[in-house]
Image (cartoon, grey):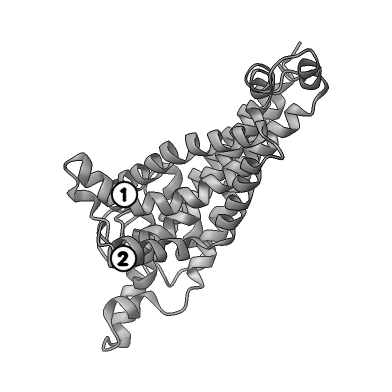
Amino acid sequence: MTNPALPLIASRLVISAITLLIVSVAVFFATTMLPGDTATILLGQAATPEAVAGLRKAMHLDEPAVLRFLYWAGGLLSGDLGTSYANDMPIADLIAGRFVSSMKLAGITALVSVPLALTLGITAAMLKGSLYDRAVTVLTIGIISVPEFMIATSAVLFFAVYLQWLPAISFANETVTWSDVLRVYAMPVLTLTFGVASQMIRMTRAAVVETLNTPYAEMALLKGASRGRVVLRHALPNAVGPIVNAIALSLSNLVGGVIIVETIFNYPGIAKLMVDAVATRDLPLIQSCAMVFCVGYLILITAADVIAILANPRLR
């Protein structure tokens, strides 16, 4: 008999592939509608019409948009991201170094936010209705209500301007000792952790509370088991799927948060590279950076769905 989880996993993978195709179309045609002419921006306002026309032809900008999309999509499938208009360098080389920096920032944020959020979410569920639970709920709602750019700007004003403890700009390539790492990553990680952990705390708490309300958990409480034992032995194993979903969904918010954080702190990551590419209207670089973020987001969401399916005992 076929495992009922396999068709569900296959359908999730197919949906992810279709989503990626739709997103690639949207990214390509959205970037082509950016104001201004790329050839004119690269050559300057003093360029002659003949020079602009020649550059447009050399960059295939005079061809139909559909044909250019097919060339671009074919390059993506073959691993060729193209050449940057502004830097005249392979885009893969430009992204490679920045990708490592962005992954460092995301990895450190995950190492800080995930244990913190799980601890606060689970303990708040165990003490549901207590003063501690209410304090955690109010705190998370308050943090969610504040935009990330406001948190980042406030951190710069407080820690860099007033106290002068931390640098306002993150020179990630100059980290040598652990103290350097702490100084460079403290404010970016703090900003991202506020946004990621607050969502994760609420979703984790909701998943554990829902599991505690099931008949088997209530029966264990009636038999005299402590609330902590019920959570650890009964609730958490059955809440793995929702909790993993909460982690993946929260970490996927790093995609939007990283763009803001890398711009404010001048952090040398992919998001900062994409923002700089928008200023120079470097379309291939913008499109490639956007696709990196989209692929990362889809991987997190798809992994969460697959783990949730495998964690469901009825499907196993």
Residue 73 in percent (x, y) is at 48, 51
Q: Amino acid at mark 2?
A: Tyr
Q: Which mark is residue 185?
A: 1
Up-down relation of residue 310 to residue 77 (above or below): above
Horizontal side, residue 74 vs residue 13: left or right: left
Q: Which mark is residue 210?
A: none
Q: Which residue is mark 2?
A: 85
Q: Secondary structure at mark 1?
A: helix
Up-down relation of residue 63 to residue 189 (above or below): below
Q: CA distance from mark 2 to mark 1?
A: 31 Å
Horizontal side, residue 274 vs residue 171: left or right: right
Q: Secondary structure at mark 2?
A: loop
Residue 63 in percent (x, y) is at 46, 69
Does residue 25 appear anywhere in the picture?
yes
Q: Amino acid at mark 1?
A: Tyr
Residue 240 in percent (x, y) is at 63, 26
